[in-house]
Amino acid sequence: MLRVPRSRGALSGVILVLLGLWGGLAALVGPYFHFAFAPDKAWSFTAGRVWLEILPACALLVGGLILLVSANRATAAAGAWIAALGGAWFIVGGPLSTLWSASDRLGVPVGGTTRQVVEQVALLSGLGAVALFFAAVALGRLAVVGVKDARLAEREAAYTEEAPTVEEPRPVREDRPGPIQATQPLPRRTGRPPVTPPEHAEPRQATPQPIATPPAGRTAPAGRTAPRAPEPNDRRVAGDQAEDTGPFGRPGENA
């Protein structure tokens, strides 16, 4: 609800800026037209003119500019309060200056009786009353929550609710694997599976190597004997039984 449209204090701000320019320039340029307080000399910065005319005029100017540019309720209200203080000082500053020393007071109005009354109203009390009125109007408008303020706050609240706060997950394409979720366990690697031999594997047989026979005239090296040709009287052993291959019979039998 602190957000307000700038048009809320625009009219009061413009009027306060114009009143501030009038109060400050009239004190310095008025002597050209004999419309000022003594001394009747233009661009003369006396203590009375600075404290009673130029200083409150600057307050009106600053407060009006804040009302024009601010879109915050608190800041605009502060500008209205500054302008209200400036307008009040235009009203009460003249009577209070009678308690000061003569060198710090504002001089008497220049001209006849009618001009003096107009100068008193246009440059001090009347100017302060008008400025105080528009500053109070701006404060009243800022203190009330209008229909525009409520609609603006509703639109901002709806925009805040509709705004995404968490990034939505991207759709997963079918040809690409999706991201691994945090709750999905990762596959655990194990050792290499044992290699089982085939069921019907045949044992490999060693290929017999032929024994080289030394040529004629040479003897076999030590530790090696040359194979001899089988003879009829030789016996061949198979298992635990001996087979008779010759003309002789088995042991214990007569030939």
Image: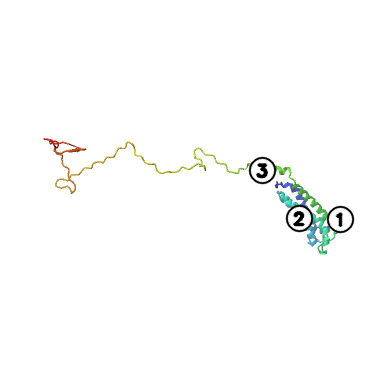
Q: Which residue is mark 1?
A: 117
Q: Position of residue 246 (x, y in %)?
A: 14, 36
Q: Is residue 21 visible?
A: no
Q: Which residue is mark 2?
A: 59
Mark 3 residue type: Ala
Rounded to the nearest angstrom, the CA distance separating label 3 from label 1 is: 56 Å
Q: Observer-nearest residue: 40 or 54?
A: 54
Look at 19% across and 38% down and name the residue there.
237
Do callouts 3 and 1 mark residues in contact (Cβ within 8 Å)? Answer: no
| Position above or below: 229 against 81 | above
Task: Please identify the quarter of the rendering in which residue 100 is found.
Answer: bottom right
Q: Is residue 70 left or right of residue 202?
A: right
Q: Observer-nearest residue: 211 or 197?
A: 197
Q: Observer-nearest residue: 8 or 21?
A: 8
Q: Nearer the viewer, mark 2 or mark 1?
A: 2
Q: Position of residue 124 (x, y in %)?
A: 82, 56
Q: Position of residue 37 (x, y in %)?
A: 83, 59
Rounded to the nearest angstrom, the CA distance separating label 2 from label 1 is: 24 Å
Element type at mark 1: helix
Look at 74% across and 47% down and name the residue there.
8
Mark 1 residue type: Val
Mark 2 residue type: Ala
Rounded to the nearest angstrom, the CA distance separating label 2 from label 3 is: 37 Å
Of the image marks 2 and 1, the number of the one nearer the N terminus:
2
Q: Which residue is mark 3?
A: 157
Q: Residues within 10 Å of mark 2 (few under 14, many from 20)?
A: many
Task: Please identify the quarter of the rendering in which residue 201 is found.
Answer: top left
Seen as rendered, the residue at the extreme front is 252
